[in-house]
Amino acid sequence: MHSRSDRFRAHQEPGAALIVGVGARDGASVAEVLGLIEETLRDAGLAPSRVVELATVEAKAGAAGITGAAARLGVRVRGYPAALLDGIAVPHPSAAALAAVGTASVAEAAALADGGGLLVPKRKSRPISGPARVTCAVAYRGQSEWNRPGRK
């Protein structure tokens, strides 16, 4: 894990790339996904222009809410295997996520999967009616096998 000063420095660097990890239940809309991402970035003082990808579990990488939000942000979606995400230590694991997709964390683990540092821990959407269907977390981009040049 990176030190607090590393996270602070990455947060302050205007060009530091950000990864937004996203978890979504079936039926999550583009509006709910995008709304949570925008609110989270705004509350943390992070520019949406710094986001380079949305990361999630492979099983959700094609979900309309996630792909639609990525399109609106002009970034790609990267799906990670559940087994890989389940091996990443996170501050807020979830038994519900483990039961649903095979990993105790989607948003935080996906944000951290490329070796960066967590800037904003998991947050849940707050829809007007019904339960939250979306979670997100923000990390600065690290260096791992997943984001080396030439890897898609």
Image (tube, grey):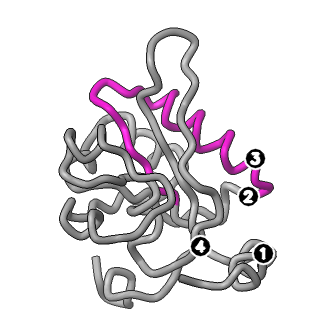
Q: How far is mark 3 from mark 1, CA to CA? A: 15 Å
Mark 3 or mark 2, whichever is nearer to me: 3
Q: How far is mark 1 from mark 2, CA to CA? A: 9 Å
Does 152 appear in magenta? no
What amino acid type is highlighted by mark number 4? Tyr
Q: Secondary structure at mark 4?
A: strand
Cβ atoms under marks 1 and 2 closer than 8 Å = yes
N-term-proximal mark, 1 vs 2 = 1
Q: Identify the residue position indicated by label 4 in the image.
A: 140
Q: Identify the residue position indicated by label 3 in the image.
A: 42
N-term-proximal mark, 3 vs 4 = 3
N-term-proximal mark, 3 vs 2 = 3
Residue 52 image label: none
Q: Identify the residue position indicated by label 2 in the image.
A: 47
Lateral position of residue 66 relative to residue 53, left or right: left
Mark 3 or mark 1, whichever is nearer to me: 3
Mark 4 or mark 2, whichever is nearer to me: 4
Lateral position of residue 79 relative to residue 41, left or right: left
- For the view shown, which residue lies furthest in the top direction? 129
**Residue 95, position in %: x, y?**
30, 43
